[in-house]
Each structure stands twice: as C-alpha cells, then as structure tokens.
Amino acid sequence: MSTPLLVQALAALSAPALAGATVLGLRGRRARATAAAGAERLLARIAELEERCAELERTASCDPLTGVWNYRHLQLTLDREIERARRAEHSDQGDGPRPLAVLMLSIAGFDAVVAEHGRGRAGAVLRDLAQRLAMEIRRADTLGRYSGEEFLVVLPDTGAEGAAQVAERLVWSVRRHLLLDWSSGTRAPRPAHGNGLTAAVGIAVLPEDGTHAAVLLRTADTALAEARAAGGDCWRSTARPPDRAAAGRCAPVASGPEQGPTAERNRSEKPGSLSACAGGDPLAQPVTSHTPATVAVPRDVLS
C-alpha cells in the first residue's frame, strides 16, 4: 500500500477514537463538576445540622422561664466538677481533692409580686433577677434554676470562705435588685429597705460535707432550711473552717444602699457572665478569664 493511502487509512481509523476520547473527557469534567457541587451542598447541610444540634443542646440545657441553666444541666455540671475535683486527689500534687462549693438559694416574697402583677409579669421579674444573679458569679461558676424560686450555684475551686463571700453577695443582690417597673410615668425610687424580696442560702463544701452530688445537695438543703428558720435574708453553712467562728456563719448582710457586703468588695474585680443558654457550649470547660456581659432585657410575658 502506498504512503498516501496508508495515511488516509490511519486517519479514518483514528477519527472515531479521537471523538470517543473527547466525549469521555467532557463527561469526566461534567461528573467532577457535579460531584463538587454535591460536596458543597453536603457540607452546607452538615453545617446546618451542626448548628441545629448545638441549638437543641442549648435548649435542652436552658430553663425557658429564667434563661439560666436548668436542673438537667446542673446535675451534669455538678457530677463533672465533682469528678474533676476527685481526680486532683490522685494527681502528682497529692494535696487531696480540689475544693468545690454548692450554694442552694431560695427567694422569698414572690407571692406579693404575683398578686400585684400576675404570673406573667412575675415570671419576667424572676427572669430579670436570675440574670442579675448570674452576673454576680465568675464565668467558671454555674448558676441554674433548681425548682420554683430556688437556684443552685456550683463554684469550682472554692472553699468555705469563698462560698460565704458569694452567698453574702447573692443575698445582698436579691434584696437590693431594682425590680421591673411597667408604669408609664417616672420610675419609682428604690425602696429604702429593699424591694420586698429576700434570699436564704445554704452552703455545702467538698470534701468537708461529702464527695458525692447527692450528699452535697442534701447538706446544702439542710443548711438552706436552717437559713429559712433563722428568718431568711442570710446564709448558713455546716462547714467548719478553722479560721472562722461558728457564730458568724449565719449573719444577715448590711442593708444600707450605700454599702455592700464583704463579698461586694472582695469579688467586685471578678465580673461574671450570663448563662451560656444565650449561646455557647453548654458543657464547656471552666474559663479562667473573666469578662463582663450584658444583662438580657426580659420580656413582659414569658412563655
């Protein structure tokens, strides 16, 4: 066969192969583009599901009325902090478990608020007060609604003296808190002798009062009953720190508006934060830094 004929034969045979390769190349590019678009949609869907999951976790851990942590989150946090404190006992330091304090706080006087404003607005008052109390603790601490008008505070790395300071501060804050005012005129001045609300606080400390959540809660509840029996507006603790007299363990705090309790002076440089129900990891590790936060504006009617 002559050379021109051979070239023509090869060209005729290679044309279908070239056409097939071109078609396969186009199909490959189209498939890669489709796969890339599908991967982008999948990543977007995963991000959306992760955001919804985080929102569900916050909702499951948040008290809907007050906006602070709920009973479930308090139990998980207390168990976690107790385990962390007990692990420190077996560390290289060998100094025993890390201190941990539990405060059980009960607010009295809400019956009058309900009678005057109704349950909806009384709920708004309770929410506003709960958010204010959350501002009085460190970011590493946890405040949640235990039941009704009772709240629980978990204070990691806090002994009896530090817990007493926090209790004084919370009792003082409840009495001096400026309640919501729904009047259309000028806001009434702060009452000279408080707002009609008082708080009683019971304190339990690990390891003096036990190393189990149920024992600490029972001890704090017993101390709270003693504070109520003493007339409220004070705190009680069954702990016996060696450098503090037992007679000073239930002492009403100063009532004058011009002076706060000792805790106000000792802890004023450590502003706290609102409940992470407003956003964030509900089981985040304690944070050592302290940054101020803004109190959420309560609504008139709460769901």
Image: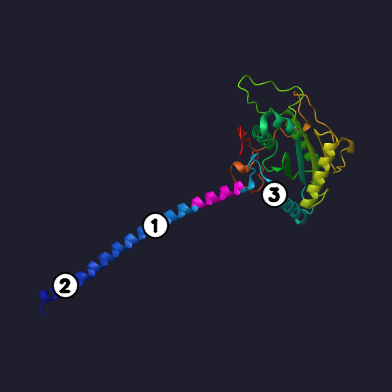
Q: Amino acid at mark 1?
A: Ala
Compare marks 1 and 3 and give the one earlier in the sequence.
1
Mark 1 nearby-residue class (10 Å; few <14, some 14–19, many ≥20): few
Decide: is 164 above or below 26. above
Q: Amino acid at mark 3?
A: Thr
Relative horizontal placement of residue 116, taking residue 94 as reference (left or right): left
In the rendered image, the quadrant that contains the N terminus is bottom left
**Residue drawn at (80%, 51%) of the image:** 215
Q: What whole-number distance in Å separates the C-alpha atoms at marks 2 and 3?
A: 79 Å
Q: Magenta residues, as a range?
A: 47-59
Decide: is 101 above or below 299. below
Say how many tags the image has: 3
**Residue drawn at (78%, 54%) of the image:** 89
| Residue 12: numbered disc | 2
Q: Is residue 214 visible?
A: yes
Q: Nearer the viewer, mark 1 or mark 3?
A: 3
Along the line of sight, which residue is nearer the eye, 280 or 96?
A: 280
Q: Could you tell me residue 292's position as x and y percent? A: 63, 35
Give the residue number, with chain letter if any, for mark 1.
36
Relative horizontal placement of residue 287, taking residue 36 as reference (left or right): right
Q: Amino acid at mark 2?
A: Ala
Q: Secondary structure at mark 1?
A: helix
Give the residue number, with chain letter if any, for mark 3.
77
